[in-house]
Amino acid sequence: MLTGAEKQILGPDVEHDGVRDDVQDRLAVLHGNDAALTDAATIFARAVTRSAILGARGARPTAAQLGHLKAELDCYWAMAKGKGFEPLPASRIEALVVNDSERLKAYLDFVSNASGVPTEPSADAPCTLAQATSPAV
Amino acid sequence: MKKSLHTFALLAALPLASLAESADPSHGTFQVCANTDAPVSLAFANGLLSTWVSANEALDATVSKLEQEKKGLADRGTLLFHADKGLLDELRAVFEQRLAEVELSADDKQAAYASFFAFLAASENEPLAGADWWAQTRQAMGAVVLARMTAFAARDAAELRSDAANDVAAIEGLLDAGKGVLVVAHGHGNLYANAALKQAVNPGNEARVRYLGAATAAATHWPGTGGLTYASSAGDDVLNALRIALILASHPEPLPANQLAPHPVLAGSFTGHGYVANYLSQATPAGASFRGMLSNAFTSVKSAPASPGALAFRLTQTAQLDAMAATSYNVAWTVQEPQEFRTPDETVVASVVETFDPGTSKLTVVAQSNCGYMPALASGLRPLLMQTPVEGLPPAPSSIMVTLQPGNAEPAVSWVPVDLWPHPGSSGRWAMYTGMIGTTPSHEGITLFWSASGPT
């Protein structure tokens, strides 16, 4: 369960998929309403959101968490390249998610403590935008 | 009186049947004895102004560049990541302070965050926020970055070595897996790469390592194995500012710019320092040069002699002086490492069996190599002599001699003096000496003798 502060970092998420609704809407526009591309970008946005929530908890990234973050970024790149679409810089997607002071502090706290080699996630973990009642944190 | 010490024989019987001829095709295309086409992995060390995500983007862009040339990387690369949390905190504080001073619409505020993240990623995209506000904010953050870069580049070697511990482990892991390693570093990542390579590379594996720096902040570079090891553009404003700051602070300045072509005015390119935007770009002279160096470095390490990964074979001899005889060492041997050496595809290329006869103090090591891995095997055979200095007894041997001798009772073909140097693990009353053996794959049935002699 997310605490109140963590829910603030997540923001409005009617679909309960771990990504703020306005982020998903914006990603759809930026990707020409291509559903598959939008999903791939949303998967990475969800990973950024999850990282910010973990950062708000004061957690240091584990190798597995970094592995997921990298894999979810890779999903987006692979999908975009496969469709001949120039992917947005990851910083654009990070900025869509991390757009206020609390989110910025939490996210930077998390990723700036990254070190070591990420663990490859299991094959079924990334690249799917499954419905969830809360972010997978 | 010269003290006579034991002489021990290491018998290495070496049937040199070529694995290349007998290899099971189901093991894939890795040619054990071919000494070419080694699997190569890329390791990327990011610059100071990076986030974890942007550092991964830089790694991926480098991998993609090599893949475009169908270079055949062994994997998706390894990120040697370093973050400066203090710098990020300072930049965040400057950004938020500036943000609080203006009234921005929701769209402009979103653009400001996008610009901030682009700045953190050193991606040099077009400014997305209002031009004047962002220009001033960017200038203020740039001053913070320069101050931090100057302080960072002036750090001492011991601190860098300590901070590079994860990088050392990552590079050693790749080498131990039998891969060639191409280390690419940007900006301050070169300081870490230098420190890591100095610790991870040794005479036994250096042929499988190449190093290439972009916009290096380092005053010297790990030498690599020939050719240019870095590209720094004369039009790199960040590097130029850092150079001046370091000179003014009486610290060693970065290596000189060696890419002197005028820096073109690219849309969105502000500093000439960005790794992807400039040094990996097809649109800049420095980029064209660096891309060529990258390709050459990869080809060079790809064709380096292959060797099995787990050649960390070590024999540890605990030599305790015999107080009564004072003329010989009583020796106990232990083999610490796995005794089968495998290629990445699990082909056993060498095995070692050792026996020790306490009665004669004779250690016999039978090393069987399946193909032309003798150089690597021999370089893995590092007789480590550990001596416990006991008061009143002779000091450690001053030299170790090694001879390589055919197994068919012919005379020894050579005596090879072995360099001795204190092992990094030496401490206190323990002294450890390491000798390297060199040989060639052409010997069959080689007998390795080594003896130690002490000073008078």
Image (spheres, grey):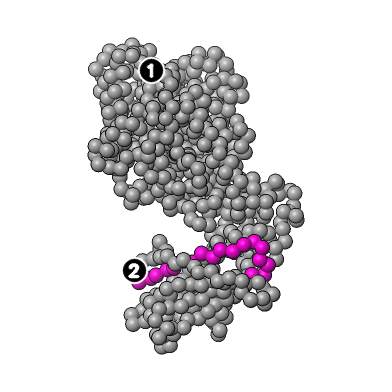
Q: Secondary structure at mark 1?
A: loop
| The magenta stretch spans residue B384 | no
| Quadrant of residue B240 within the rendered picture | top left
Give x and y (percent) for residue B83: 37, 38
Please name the amino acid that badge 1 sits on: Pro
* Residue lying at 32% horizontally and 25% vertically, measured from the top left: A101
From the viewer's side, name the closer residue of B363 and B336: B363
Q: Badges 1 and 2: C-beta atoms under 8 Å apart?
A: no
Name the kind of residue labelled 2 in the image: Gly
User: Is residue A25 or residue B114 the one in the foreground?
Assistant: B114
Which residue is label 2 attached to? B428
The magenta stretch is B429-446
Q: Quadrant of residue B322?
A: bottom left
The chain containing the residue under callout 2 comes to B
Q: Is residue B438 magenta?
A: yes
Residue topped by disc 1? B127
**Which residue occupies 75% across, 55% down?**
B21
Left or right, B53 with respect to A78, comes to left
B42 or B223: which is nearer to us? Answer: B223
Pointer 1 indicates a residue of which chain? B
Q: Residue at x 53, y 16 (%)?
A: A31
Q: Residue at x 51, y 48 (%)?
A: B225
Q: CA distance from mark 1 to mark 2?
A: 59 Å
Pick the front one: B259 or B98: B259
Query: Residue B438's x, y, as percent?
Result: 56, 63
Rate crowding at label 1 as few (under 14), some (14 to 19) or many (20 or more) other CA atoms within 10 Å.
some
Tell me the quarter of the image containing the C terminus of chain B: bottom left
SS category of the residue bearing label 2: loop
